[in-house]
Amino acid sequence: MEPFWIAIGVIAVVSAVGAAAFRRNRVQHPGGRRRGGTKPPPVLGVREDHPAYSAALRLEAVLDDDFIARVKDRVLHAEPNLAEQQWEWRWFELKRYFLMCGIMRAVPMYSSKVDDIWHEMLMFTREYQVFCERFCGAMIHHAPHGKAGQPRPDERAMFEWVYTELFGPPAQRPDIWGPFYRVPMSPGLLSELANKSECALKERRFNMRAAERFGDLEASVDRLIKTARGQISEAKSRIEQGEDRLRRESWPQPVEMMGAAMIFASMSQPQQYDRHMEQLTGKAERGQGSGSSCNSSYYGGDSRDAGDCTPSGGDGGGSSCSSSCGGGCSS
């Protein structure tokens, strides 16, 4: 019987060690595997049926491996305790940011963790320029904000809506961009998206120089405009039918419908927007399985001034008008 009791003792010791390791991992990575154990999804998490999918593939393809390695070395030299997975997620979110810059006219930067990597990329001026030109046809300029240059709430709301439409809610790494879905889309922004002429809206909000060069970026702009107008129309219809608040049963596909929910909550109950979106976000995260902010104290970012993206030059990007607009934009 002695070998039997020895075996039992060994099993007990191994179990105790394993349990301790599990508890230690839970402390170091609160939220379990979803928050701390997952890797970034492929193709920046863009759905294959979205026109931005091919743009995301191009973005990944034109990033030289040696360039990435040298940027990473500089980041780790400045932050030697940065874990590999932390690097992966910050780099991943910077690439998402660049994709947004290829589509939008100006994209505020809300994360110092992402912005730090961008700064290191800018040290390699030739490689960075080649990447930008191959991806979207022009430099993605970094223009730092002063302390007085804080973005309007609508800028954050628009950032979150476009991010959500391209990638879904930021469930895996919410610590990078700060809390989402705290700022409703204002009546002015919603009216602009719904009523402004398509040409004027493109000129104001989107990177039309890049769109004129790359068909997938142009198609992404068109998709976003069409989607926004459809979601606003649907929200109006729901409100007219007496629906006055977000109900989970009304949004059966929460990951795909988060952008629509943002618009509906902004229109129906803007004073309780954050509470309703928080309830829906929990459902979306389960379904998904998955700053340096110019106004970080307001938005819940990480309390540092940052920059924005000026995709097409110092004037904030955008051409005089997309060729599809027929020769003139009026606001």
Image (spheres, rainbow, N blue to C red):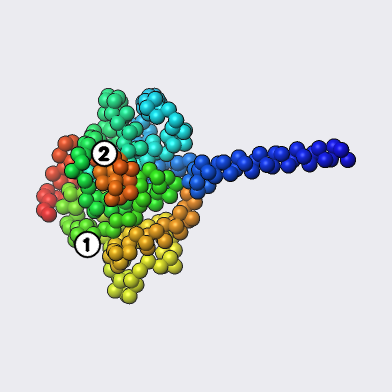
Instruction: Give the amino acid at mark 1.
Output: Pro
The vertical placement of 59 against 223, above or below, is: above
Marks 2 and 1, Cα distance to the nearest angstrom? 27 Å
Q: Assess disc 2: are there few (<14), some (14-19) or many (≥20) residues with their C-alpha within 10 Å of its C-alpha.
A: many
Dividing the picture into quadrants, the one containing residue 94 is top left
Q: Does residue 269 appear in the picture of this structure?
A: yes
Instruction: Residue at 34%, 59% (x, y): give it.
Output: 274
Q: Is residue 267 above or below residue 109?
A: below
Quadrant containing the N terminus is top right
Q: 119 or 66: nearer the eye? A: 119
- Name the quarter where the C terminus is drawn: bottom left
Where residue 20 sits, quadrant-wise, is top right
Task: Mark 2 or mark 1: name the one nearer the start of the chain.
Answer: 1
Q: Residue at x 28, y 58 (%)?
A: 184
| Percent of width and height locating residue 152 | 21, 51
Give the percent coordinates (x, y) of residue 226: 28, 57
